[in-house]
Amino acid sequence: MLKTERADLRCICDVYDVQRTRAKESLNAAFECVAHEEALALPNIDAVVIAPPDHLHIDLAAAALQAGKHVYLEKPTTHRFEEQHRLREAVRKSGKVLQCTTLTEANATEVNGQTLDSADTL
């Protein structure tokens, strides 16, 4: 995502100190925090990438949507089938976009050596 230069990294949020520090240093993030509530309260953040352990997806995605952020959610969307109703309702109430895919799929911006634009189709 960052390689496309269509997004700016504003914050790294991770409870694991070693991973958070490594990510902040390698990606040159301006801000870091442990609590997701702190990251979601930042007014200069429009969208978030959520990639925690699977069982946390629903709570973090719902919190981000409630905070008025667009959400890019790593697969799987929910940990249990029953949770999908809660997530769908959170999207509906927020009016924001939720996209779910694997991060490796999203990083595939080249096909057969040709760089793809968001408007390109295969």
Image: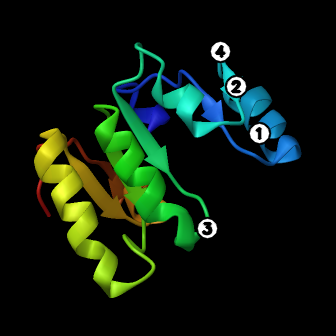
Q: Which residue is mark 4?
A: 30
Q: Position of residue 42 (x, y in %)?
A: 48, 18
Q: Amino acid at mark 2?
A: Glu
Q: Amino acid at mark 3?
A: Pro
Asked whether disc 4 touches disc 2, contact meaning CB atoms under 8 Å apart, the reply is: no
Report, in whole angstroms, how far the alpha carbon at label 4 lies from the one at label 2.
Answer: 7 Å
Residue nearer the viewer, 103 or 3 = 103
Residue nearer the viewer, 60 or 44 = 60
Q: Which residue is mark 1?
A: 20
Could you tell which of marks 3 and 1 lies nearer the N-terminus? 1
The residue at 46%/22% (across/down) is 8
Crowding near the residue tagged with mark 1, few <14, some 14–19, many ≥20 C-alpha atoms within 10 Å: some
Which secondary structure, mark 2?
strand
Which secondary structure, mark 4?
loop
Which secondary structure, mark 3?
loop
Q: Look at the image and tell me whether residue 120 can be seen.
A: no
Report, in whole angstroms, how far the alpha carbon at label 3 lies from the one at label 1.
Answer: 15 Å
Report, in whole angstroms, how far the alpha carbon at label 4 lies from the one at label 3.
Answer: 24 Å
Could you tell which of marks 2 and 3 lies nearer the N-terminus? 2
Q: Position of residue 52 (x, y in %)?
A: 59, 59
Asked whether disc 4 touches disc 3, contact meaning CB atoms under 8 Å apart, the reply is: no
The residue at 14%/45% (across/down) is 93
Q: Amino acid at mark 1?
A: Arg
Asked whether disc 1 touches disc 2, contact meaning CB atoms under 8 Å apart, the reply is: yes
Q: Which mark is residue 44?
A: none
Q: Which residue is mark 2?
A: 32
- Disc 4 versus disc 2: nearer the observer: 2
Q: Position of residue 65 (x, y in %)?
A: 30, 42
Q: Which residue is mark 3?
A: 53
Q: Amino acid at mark 4?
A: Ala
- Image quadrant of residue 87? bottom left
